[in-house]
Amino acid sequence: MTVQAWRVLVADDDPAICTLIETVLRKGPYQIVLRNDAETALVALDRDGPFDVVVCDFMLPGISGIDLIERLRSDGRTRRVPILMISGHNNYAMEKRAMAAGANLFLNKPFTISQLRTAVNSLLAQPKVDPFANAPAASR
């Protein structure tokens, strides 16, 4: 019996965070693809997709994490992919913006190994639904 390798795309410009996420998730049934900005993450989604989960930083060079989420949610191919947004800014307004853009979960840096695993596993356990299915048309 083979174990499914969940495909996880990580977009974060901090090499230490990328290394941490890769190290933590490599111990599970995950195939990790790391990108250091939103533009190359979008290319990976187009070329190497589909992915089971996207983890992205709020602050990215070029296109922001919020813009990345909005692009994913506006594309039929990625609209239902669970998204975990991470940020080093402990600011409720940022979390609210991320969730309004379509993030499924928000995790503040620094996070623990347990918090990261729990967040990713939680996203994988949820049915893939359209995050805007019940939202008013103005929110889409």
Image (spheres, rainbow, N blue to C red):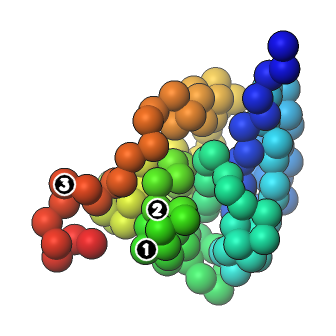
- Seen in the picture, residue 28 relative to 50 is either above or below; the reply is above
Residue at the location (56% across, 34% down)?
124
Please state which of residues 61 and 48 is positioned toward the viewer in this rendering.
48
Which residue has dot 1 on it?
Answer: 74
Dot 2 amino acid type = Arg
Q: Secondary structure at mark 2?
A: loop
Please state which of residues 27 and 113 is positioned toward the viewer in this rendering.
27
Which residue has dot 2 on it?
Answer: 79
- In space, the residues marked 2 and 3 are separated at their CA atoms by 14 Å
Q: Residue furthest bottom?
A: 62
Q: Secondary structure at mark 1?
A: helix
Contact, mark 2 vs mark 3 (Cβ under 8 Å): no
Q: Which mark is residue 134?
A: 3
Dot 1 amino acid type = Ser
- In space, the residues marked 1 and 2 are separated at their CA atoms by 6 Å
Which quadrant holds residue 112?
Answer: top right
Contact, mark 1 vs mark 2 (Cβ under 8 Å): yes
- Residue 129 x %, y %: 38, 46
Task: Name the N-terminal-most of marks 1 and 2.
Answer: 1
Q: From where the camera sits, is residue 66 visible?
A: no
Q: How many marks?
A: 3
